[in-house]
Image (cartoon, coloured by chain):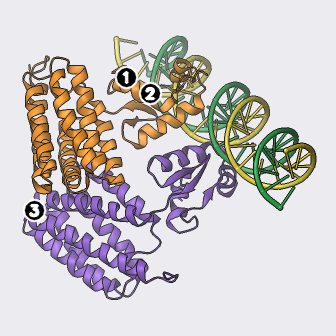
Chain colours: A purple, B orange, C green, D yellow
Amino acid sequence: MTIAAPQKDAYSLILEAIDMGTYKPGDRLVESDLAERFGVSRTPIREALQRLETQSLLTRDGRSLIVASLDHNQLAELYVVRAELEGLAANLAARHATEEEVRVLRDMVEDDQKLKGDPTAMARANRRFHKQIHLASHNRFLVQQLDLVHRSMALMATTSLAADGRPEDALAEHDAIVSAIEARDAEAAGEALRAHISKAFVTRLKLDSGELGSVS
Amino acid sequence: MTIAAPQKDAYSLILEAIDMGTYKPGDRLVESDLAERFGVSRTPIREALQRLETQSLLTRDGRSLIVASLDHNQLAELYVVRAELEGLAANLAARHATEEEVRVLRDMVEDDQKLKGDPTAMARANRRFHKQIHLASHNRFLVQQLDLVHRSMALMATTSLAADGRPEDALAEHDAIVSAIEARDAEAAGEALRAHISKAFVTRLKLDSGELGSVS
DNA sequence: TGCCTTGGCATTGTATACAAATGTTCTGGG
DNA sequence: CCCAGAACATTTGTATACAATGCCAAGGCA
């Protein structure tokens, strides 16, 4: 028996399109265009757009919706909040994760060593790793808040894993985080994750400043 | 020239109804009922409901939407996240608030002394106080996240300010928080706000356990 | 030549009609 | 008397038609 294709809803489809870069920050989203593109009527499209707007992935420009963009300040603000929440997640994970969950984290760190060459796979694995820590916190609100944070990160063009040598560093940091969780050292785990995010932020800033289109 | 009544949208109307307790946790929200009640068609109602659902104020029960309810665990989870985020806000406020913003906070603490007798006014003043701290952090993402947290708190029937002696304690704690911000002591401010939330949580737990409908 | 006005057009906001799905009640058989 | 099944009613999901609003361009007037 064949399982029907998951038949994603409009929300997921649009979100995916933003994730893939089909729609870039600043692009205008026209309801009728999207409706035609996805083969549904405007009604479900509108509902999806409103959801994305409440999550700040879209923003209003006059009457129409455009993909939100992050200026330098907003980027900094986002990373501050992310560091705090991810740190909290690691702290809670150290205290509340089951042995099995910790084991999964450890396995991930081992397995991801093999992906160092493939940036796309690395990025996906990285997301799964962080998600697993979120879940291990056993705090549903925190998971939800972190989901929001990560969704906003879709507005950034590139992953910080694109930087030279960053995959190696990131994996070493992941290892340190998992070690702290294994030791059930909540403080150390939180601190390790905060440091991890901080380094990712530094990397991103370097990437952004080094990009083409220099300052006059 | 008369200004037309603000003409709130469906989203605000439903949110307000939940806030006022018109719809209580567990209540089912039927689109056509709401449409008739607010004198609009189902379309804007649906959009409002979807927004509320993405904010977890509504949840699905089968196919229909009901007002979300917080069990004991979720309450605890919410307070953990709230303490962390509010603490971060106070920390940032101590560092980034303008002199004028600090002054507003100080004035609020002074003025709110007069409201101790009126629980409703106290609750409103309390919200404004916390909101002012959020804004003083000058971090838009943080403000947004805290908005979400506070919206979820609408699902709790009573405010912790309803407890005997709580208004006095709360005001003293507010004073301590503002003092730390005035001194630009970020660590102390964050800690003071975390302690404030922690005490509010303790109060709430006592309130909840003391309610009618005892344990057989 | 430049600015303001006006008209048309594109796009969003709202309502309504229709289809699909789920829960409910009534009836008949065991 | 209880259970099963089917018809029915209620409610959500989707499409489409219509209204209203804001934007842009073209033309006229200063």
Which chain does the residue under circle 3 lie in? A
Q: Residue at x 47, y 72 (%)?
A: A157
- Dot 1: element: loop
Q: Total of numbered circles in the picture?
A: 3
* Front residue of this view, candidates C24 and A52: A52
> Seen in the image, is A68 located left or right of residue B58?
right
Residue picked out by circle 2: B14
Between the C-alphas of marks 3 and 1, the distance is 40 Å
* Crowding near the residue tagged with mark 3, few <14, some 14–19, many ≥20 C-alpha atoms within 10 Å: many
Badges 3 and 1: C-beta atoms under 8 Å apart? no
| Sequence-wise first label, 2 or 1 | 2
Between the C-alphas of marks 3 and 2, the distance is 41 Å
Residue type at mark 1?
Tyr
Q: Residue at x 29, y 80 (%)?
A: A112
Badges 2 and 1: C-beta atoms under 8 Å apart? yes
Q: Residue at x 40, y 78 (%)?
A: A121
* Crowding near the residue tagged with mark 1, few <14, some 14–19, many ≥20 C-alpha atoms within 10 Å: some
- Dot 3: element: helix
Give residue A193's quadrant in the image. bottom left
Q: Position of residue B56 (x, y in %)?
A: 36, 40
- Dot 2: element: helix
Residue picked out by circle 1: B23
Residue picked out by circle 3: A186
